[in-house]
Image (cartoon, helix red, strand yellow):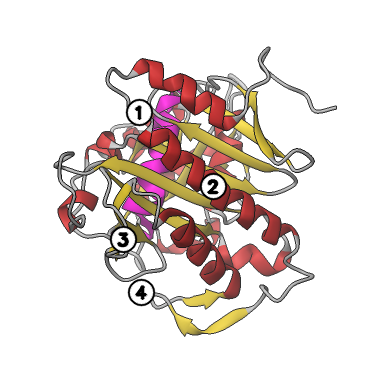
Amino acid sequence: MPIFNTSKLVTIERHIAEEQAFYAGATGEFSRLMRDLTLALRIIARDVRRAGLSDVLGITDSQNVHGEQVKKLDEYANDVIFRAMDHGGHLCAMASEESEGIIKIPSEYRKGKYVLLFDPLDGSSNIDVNAPIGTIFSVYRRLDSNADTDGTEADLLQPGYKQVAAGYCCYGSSTVLVYTSGNGVDVFTFDQTIGEFLLTYEKIKIPKRGKYYSINEGNYHKWNTRLQQYVNYLKMPSDDKQRPYSLRYIGTAIADVHRTLHYGGIFMYPADKSAPVGKLRLMYEVNPLAMIIEQAGGRATDGFGRVLQQQPIEIHQRVPVFMGSEDDVLEAEAFMQNRHPSQQL
């Protein structure tokens, strides 16, 4: 039997339907949007589990908009989400990490009042070695909710604090969906025997401080001095026994963030000499993950300010990010801004 950390037996669809009560005038359109999206996630989860048995491992002959080699499963996941979402009448536009610009809704379908941004398969470098991978998504209302035309770039380029909902689906030892619509963070686990996502953690809260840090320390020589000082500080034993921290790094952002959400600590993907503006994408990765961390009581910044306040300037914009337990991120910010007491010694 699974261990449920909630007293209720609730499916994701029932949970989303019940959340409509928080919003006066809700029409059910958002609930139907999420129904279509969770169908896509179930299909992707099925084929991730069969990756070694079907022809979805390996790379294609193409590169994505970022110049990265496209994995077969990347391409497949991107196509599944598009085909699940293009005809429901809920969306006016989509954007994907794997696509160059706006993904338009086919002309024969109704244009709705939402936009969807997604990373179809985060952690592509881990696909062929059976490490955790996942899908990240973010939903916004279009700027003119009464319009019935194609969505525009302006509809997509909204700051993260305007997200209606965000989440990720992690395909690991089990398939876990972490979701927020601005009313806390809930975790659902997929039961393949009944084909449903069941609520397993309700209104999860991240610890105020943790014992783990997550960063690609192989890039240490590329970091600025302030970040090097912070990581050195985390590894130095302290009199109060709170340090040293332990390094945990998988290389799939949602897997590292998922662990941080449960155990606390800090996840970092900073700027460095080879990526001076950072590497993670603001719209597809950072904003939805930041919304989840904040809704769980944590903090998400670029080292100097709240990432959800950033006004995006282009769809594939990259940013540095520090997210996790509030006290850990505040301490990292102090180092990045050269105002931590240990830097003055």
Dot in front, 4 or 2: 4
Q: Which residues are magenta?
A: 277-299
Mark 3 and mark 1 residues within 8 Å of each other at the beta carbon = no
Q: Quadrant of the N terminus?
A: top right
Give the percent coordinates (x, y) of residue 173.
75, 46
Judging by the rendered image, the residue that carries numbered circle 4 is 65
Judging by the rendered image, the residue that carries numbered circle 2 is 254
SS type, badge 4? loop
Image quarter of residue 67: bottom left
Q: Is residue 321 magenta?
A: no
Identify which residue is drawn at 56% across, 68% down. Answer: 76
Question: Is 266 drawn above or below residue 56 in the view shown?
Answer: above
Q: Residue furthest front?
A: 108
Task: Name which residue type carries label 4.
Answer: Val
Q: Residue furthest top?
A: 7
Q: CA distance from mark 1 to mark 4?
A: 43 Å
Mark 4 and mark 2 residues within 8 Å of each other at the beta carbon = no
Dot in front, 4 or 3: 3
SS type, badge 3? loop
Dot in front, 1 or 4: 4
Judging by the rendered image, the residue that carries numbered circle 1 is 341
Of 172 and 231, the residue lying toward us: 172
Sequence-first tag of 4 and 2: 4
**In this rendering, would 155 be left or right of 34?**
left
Give the percent coordinates (x, y) of residue 170.
61, 47
Can residue 152 be seen from the camera position used here? yes
Judging by the rendered image, the residue that carries numbered circle 3 is 105
Q: CA distance from mark 4 to mark 2?
A: 21 Å
Give the percent coordinates (x, y) of residue 301.
33, 38
Image quarter of residue 56: bottom right
Sequence-first tag of 1 and 4: 4
